[in-house]
């Protein structure tokens, strides 16, 4: 399967600081990157969809100024949680659009963010 | 809005019991269907997928699922569960077949298998 590398796997930060999460598609070019969030004991919820070279599309209720997404290249997308608060503590997972139609979705290892 | 519904939120079974987890979706067009498993502390792993063809698909670890188009369902089954199957199970649907289509996940089902 495709290799998706997400870093860091765990991060603890203080309230008010910003955290950047990187997601790399290592063996295919991803024109699209999906960012999901998973709260404890809950399902994955799509936050936003980023497209290489253009602005990301955010799902309803997700603040675009708080969750900055950059998709500057076909192999790298970043999610920056700005001015983090304890309620932003969650598991963030990236998933590049697959290498072609009718392909499974591949996921990064996820980033466990804890805001203290 | 498109939705994915998993009917069983928490299932408790004894080893060797049979398993069936329900999944229904609300989109009427072409779909790609997936079941993912998440073991405690680990990331998502693909169990099986359906794109087209035979509606009965077999996945890893003895799991299978049946796509019934008329019922908008994609139920997951396993004839005999093991303690190691204890995990969270997610059904996911992608509209169309494009690789740029987002996945919509069901709420998840927690499976607890008692030894």
Image (cartoon, coloured by chain):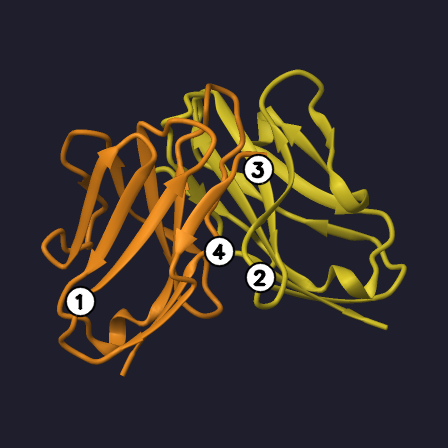
Chain colours: A orange, B yellow
Q: Which residue is mark 2?
A: B42
Q: Secondary structure at mark 3?
A: strand
Q: Is residue A43 left or right of residue A46?
A: right
Along the polypeptide, which appears first: circle 2 or circle 3?
3
Mark 2 vs mark 4, CA separation in Å: 18 Å
- Looking at the picture, how far across and down is residue A69, in whole percent? 20, 47
Mark 2 vs mark 1, CA separation in Å: 25 Å
Mark in the foreground, 4 or 1 = 1
Q: Which residue is mark 3?
A: B34
Mark 3 vs mark 1, CA separation in Å: 34 Å
Q: Are marks 4 and 1 on the same chain?
A: no
Q: Which residue is mark 4?
A: B107
- Looking at the picture, how far across and down is residue B83, in whole percent? 81, 66
- Specify the quadrant of the image occupied by residue B3: top left
- Looking at the picture, how far across and down is residue A77, in whole percent? 28, 42
Q: Which residue is mark 1?
A: A18
């Amino acid at each position: 399967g495709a290799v998706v590398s997400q870093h860091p796997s765990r991060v603890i930060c203080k309230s008010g600081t910003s955290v950047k999460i990187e997601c790399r598609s290592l063996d295919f070019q991803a024109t699209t990157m999906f960012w999901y969030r998973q709260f404890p004991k809950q399902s994955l919820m799509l936050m936003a969809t980023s497209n290489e070279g253009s602005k990301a599309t955010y799902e309803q209720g997700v603040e675009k100024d708080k969750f900055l997404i950059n998709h500057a290249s076909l192999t790298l997308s970043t999610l920056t949680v700005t001015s983090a608060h304890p309620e932003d503590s969650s598991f963030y997972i990236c998933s590049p659009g697959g290498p072609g139609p009718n392909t499974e979705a591949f996921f990064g290892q996820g980033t466990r963010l804890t805001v203290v | 809005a498109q939705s994915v519904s998993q009917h069983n939120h928490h299932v408790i079974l004894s080893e060797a019991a049979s398993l069936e987890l329900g999944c229904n979706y609300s989109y009427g067009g072409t779909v790609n269907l997936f079941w993912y498993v998440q073991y405690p502390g680990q990331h998502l792993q693909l169990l099986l997928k359906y794109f087209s063809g035979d509606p009965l698909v077999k996945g890893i670890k003895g799991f299978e699922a049946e796509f019934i188009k008329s019922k908008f369902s994609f139920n997951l089954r396993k004839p005999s569960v093991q303690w190691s199957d204890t995990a969270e199970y997610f059904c996911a649907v992608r509209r169309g077949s494009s690789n740029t289509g987002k996945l919509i996940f069901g709420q998840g089902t927690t499976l607890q298998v008692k030894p």
